[in-house]
Amino acid sequence: MRPAAAIVGTLLCATAAKGQQPPPQPAFTFQEVMIPMRDGARLQTVILTPTDKSGPLPILFRRTPYGVPDGPLPQVPAHLKELEQDGYIVVIQNLRGRFKSEGVFKLTSQVDLTDSTATNETTDAYDSIDWLVQHVPSNGKVGMFGVSYDGLTIFASLGYGTTERSSGQ
């Protein structure tokens, strides 16, 4: 009977010790900010910075109507794993009028670029990239990624002089 009690005791101690190990460090730090646009609207933006990388890192930026993470990521999603491993700061932004972003969501990229108060996906992308370069510790290079509507926002951003900043040149 004593060998069985010893085995049970050993298993209980091993389980207790395992439960006392600190949780693994998250792959990204999580920061939510509201980036101001030229008309005063603020867009909900999440900044995910790799925790195991140092030095100035490039930013990969995605603008989306589909939502941003609402808190720290318990594990790295498959679609971000290689970006995290390569040392990218991942920034995800809800479009104007979506979720916590202020303003009105319009399913159009039309804007009068001669009107300095007009806004759309193009001007919001420009204002956001400008803010990111000035406020997020990085190497100053910002690229964009996304498919579906997120991909359309990349195309829209090219119409207002952001290509130099987007390509990091």
Image: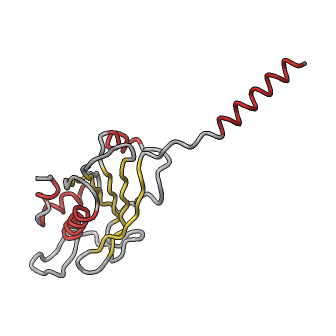
Measuring from the top left, give residue 33's x and y in whole percent. 37, 67
User: Is 130 displayed left or right of 52 in the figure?
Assistant: left
User: Is 108 displayed left or right of 164 in the figure?
Assistant: right
In the picture, the quarter occupied by the N terminus is top right
The residue at the point 42 percent across, 53 percent down is 29
The residue at the point 33 percent across, 62 percent down is 93
Measuring from the top left, give residue 155's x and y in whole percent. 18, 58
User: Is 168 displayed left or right of 56 in the figure?
Assistant: left
The residue at the point 28 percent across, 51 percent down is 147
Res 106 visible: yes
Q: Is residue 129 shown above or below 74?
A: below
| Way the structure is coloured | secondary structure
In terms of depth relative to the viewer, which is nearer, 103 or 47?
Answer: 47
Q: Which residue lies most toward the right here? A: 1
Q: Is residue 18 shown above or below 133?
A: above
Measuring from the top left, give residue 6's x and y in whole percent. 82, 22
In terms of depth relative to the viewer, which is nearer, 132 or 151?
Answer: 132
Measuring from the top left, give residue 32's x and y in whole percent. 40, 64
Res 149 visible: no
Residue 162 occupies which quadrant of the picture? bottom left
